[in-house]
Image (spheres, helix red, strand yellow):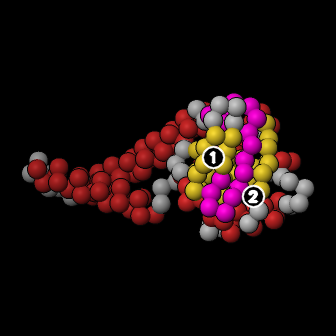
Amino acid sequence: MTPVTFSFDWKDVNQAVASKALSANFNPKWWQTFGLLFGGAAVAALVDRALSSSNGAAGLFGFLVGVYACIAWSALRYRKMAAGIRNSPSRLGGVTVTLEQDGYRVHTARTENWAAWSTVSAIKPVKNMIVLAIGDVEYMPILDTALPDSLSRKDMVSLLENLTGLTA
């Protein structure tokens, strides 16, 4: 594969659209939700047993504890994601990205980082850009206007799907 290189200025990125596309990737998975709900019920049942007041309210109390645990889990993950976006070193102006067979390189005014494709957790095509979710708290936008002339938006999504093994 021939490396694909493109550049953009961070001020051209629509932060609201990119953040919204990324936040959809951070809802608890079904197994996390059930784990928190049943964990809350188990804790409530143990507390109910320990207090020797087994009146059957532990199930409802546990369900409520589980619901609040799910909400707290989502809020904490979103908070970490938002902090990562605000503190991103790539927000310092111009960004040059090179897509290679085994990973991608991001070069800014201060840093140059290389990462494997396994760090990409989602590909989200949204209005005027393609958003790559990276890990839990970071994202990399690929602006439609920054794409090389030889690549259309559809071609870039297809290339990213092939490189990452993910589907958009």
- Residue holding disc 2: 3
CB-based contact (under 8 Å), mark 2 and mark 1: no
Give, as a three-letter code, the residue at label 1: Tyr
- Specify few, some or many for label 2: CA neighbours under 10 Å numbering under 14, 14-19, or 20 or more: few
- Specify few, some or many for label 1: CA neighbours under 10 Å numbering under 14, 14-19, or 20 or more: many
Q: Is any atom of residue 21 visible in this view?
A: no
Q: Position of residue 121 (x, y in %)?
A: 57, 57
Residue 18's mark?
none
**Secondary structure category for the residue under label 2:** loop
Q: Nearer the viewer, residue 76 or 156?
A: 156
Quarter of image, res 96: top right
Give the residues in magenta. Answer: 89-104
Q: Position of residue 101 (x, y in %)?
A: 67, 63
Residue beneath the point at 77% across and 62% down:
2
Q: Is residue 71 left or right of residue 123?
A: left
Query: Residue lying farthest right?
Result: 149
Is residue 92 one of those drawn in magenta? yes
Give, as a three-letter code, the residue at label 2: Pro
Q: Nearer the viewer, residue 85 or 53?
A: 85
Residue beneath the point at 74% across and 53% down:
130
- Residue holding disc 1: 139
Residue beneath the point at 65% across and 53% down:
104
